[in-house]
Image: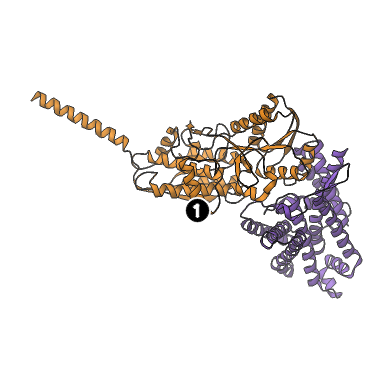
Chain colours: A purple, B orange
Amino acid sequence: MQLFLEQLVNGIALGSLYGLFGIGFGLVFATLGILNTAHGAYASWAAIIGYFAVVWYDVSFPVAIAVGVIGGGVLAILVDQIGFQPLRNRKTGMLGALITSIAFLIILDSLAGMATNHQSWAFPSRTYPRGMLDLGFMRIPYMQLIIIGAMVFCAAGIYLLIQKTRIGAAMRAVGWNAEAASLGGVNARMVILLTAFLAGATSGLAGVLGGAATSNISYMLGEGLLLKGFAAVVVGGYDDVRGTVLAGILLGICEVFIAQYLSTTFRDGFTYILLLTFLVMRPRGIFGSGNFMRA
Amino acid sequence: MIMKTGTMRLGAALAAAAFSLAGSAWADPAPGQYNIGIISDDTGPLAAAGISYHRGADLAIEEINANGFAGEGVTLNLLVKDSATDAARAVQAMTQFAADRTVLATTCCIITPIAGALSPIAMNNNLPLVIYGATREGLPQEPYVTSVVALPGPQEVMMSERLASELKPKRVAYYTTGDNDIFLARAHAVKAVFEEAGAETVAEISTLANDTDFTGPATQGMGTNPDVIMVMTTQQPAVGIISALRQRGYEGLIGTSEVISPPAIYQKSGDLIEGIPFALSFQPGLSDSPEATTFIEAYQAKYNELPDVYSAQGYTAIHYIAQGMKAIDGEPTREKLAEEMWKITSIDHNLYGGQEIVNGQAQIPETLIVNWNSDGEVALWENQ
């Protein structure tokens, strides 16, 4: 039973990373209509920035998280304004944005590889919480608690922001029709910048926390999250934070239990099958609205 | 007169014999600069090791050119193409080297699939290929494909025999890389040793080479309550698994392979990998042959860090080529170089205190069973 519970927590923590990463991914798609494959690079860069903040400036782990999150957000804004805004002005649609995002993924990954000398780094062990919470019947690493807590905080915050605030209403309006929203008095440019920042920041948070928990900070960190985050968004629904979080956690739990009770060989296969099933059977996901395709 | 003629004939015969002997003893390649191609792994998932191989090769080139190790007036020039451990890029690079007739030999490959993909190109183009990292039996092919890295299994078997003998574990768990058949075979060789010694296999946990989260596998392994855990995976999973096991509080003995030997790995993992035994054949501080000492000093001076087992292999590959070059008489060609390299039974300039080659395959040199200690140094492993 202890093994089952510990693996359950492992799965929830892993799934929380997928969910956290997927929130931003879905946010950009729902609001800006971009399937942004460069989203993975934000996670890698945030982890790298956080790592350098710790190593060079000896900052505490919370500060490293903050630096990484802000770094991820700023990077997302830069990519949006340099890469996507010109396409938006020319109304090139989803395909042009997808191709541009792939180009940015390659560029940012290559730069990240150069920044890390193509090696995998880890936060020095003294700089992040390495202990375990002993509940008697099981023990939980502090980093897993932090990851789960961060995911709950971000998911709740962004859900409330989108559903209960004027800014959220503006984001939904821009997502539905940017021109109509502008005519209605919404500052679409500000909404776009805010959305890009939030997406980059949540991806960055997943990157820094994931990098610390797995002792793996590298230019490939984001690639590992990209497919799983995408799957969480597809399964959960592009335009609903709750769905993304739920699907991310489900994915994490399934991965861990499949590896534990079946075989690692089937683990990624399960993700692909789940992804394919939803794309064919229910493309709008568990919570998603019918508004699946927009350009 | 007859005697005089006979004496003259004898003298002429002796002179001819002397010249003939001198000719072979003084066989020298034609002076000049010759290109060697390296298909490196400077970027990509194995860049940490790939950079080490490349640096070792660079250092060997400098040493060979400065000391005339490839022959009087002969210098070698290293042409670099980075494969990023991508098979398609490596094949493209090899094809380009094959088309460039100034390239006399090539060296490459950390992983076996890439070495296997390049071998036919080397054979078809009569282009010598020296493998410096990939380890699978049967890779060398006469006379063009050779390997300067010994097959690793026996070293880990020796280490496992010692661990089984000294620790007498009852329960052993194994971590493997399910999508890497070489590491899988290494794990099974280790497992056979412990089972032979009477230890029960309580778990064989498969991971994948690109995995990054090991909390689940760590929980799974610790759940079987093993006395010893053997982590026989590729580098990134090995570091991740060991870190996850230690962070979750596993205090038993963990054994692994040379994948944790690079200083960059200790710099990354620190105390989490201290005390974990692994087997290798070269280590600064423990390898003390004159060649090793010179190499370590030169490497430190050039790169401001200690060399590792991978840089030693890159260095050995180039010296192997240089030894083949030196044995050539006249204008070097790919064919002549391949023939001379295939004849080599011992690499003269090596860092292991002796390196035999049999049918183009390096044999096991001296085996060191070591661990990282609390001073951040690799020291001989002792059972605490």
- Picture coordinates of residue A39, whole percent (x, y): 74, 58
Count up the numbered dots: 1
Residue at 64 percent of width and 48 percent of height:
B266
- Picture coordinates of residue A50, whole percent (x, y): 71, 60
Q: Which amino acid does label 1 sit on?
A: Ala
- Picture coordinates of residue A53, whole percent (x, y): 70, 61
The residue to which callout 1 is attached is B301
Which of the 4 image quadrants contains residue A277? top right
Q: Mark 1 lies on which chain?
A: B
Relative to A101, residue A216 above or below: above
Residue at 82 percent of width and 57 percent of height:
A23
Residue at 86 percent of width and 57 percent of height:
A241
Residue A162 vs residue B230, the one in the foreground: B230
Using residue A245 as the reference point, say whether residue B46 is left or right of it: left
In the displayed image of the protein, which residue is found farthest to the left? B1
Q: Which element carries disc 1, helix, strand or loop? A: helix
Classify 10 Å Cα crowding around label 1: few (below 14), some (14-19), many (20 and above).
few
> The C terminus of chain B appears in which quarter of the rendering?
top right
Relative to B96, residue B123 above or below: above
- Picture coordinates of residue B307, whole percent (x, y): 54, 47
> The N terminus of chain B appears in which quarter of the rendering?
top left
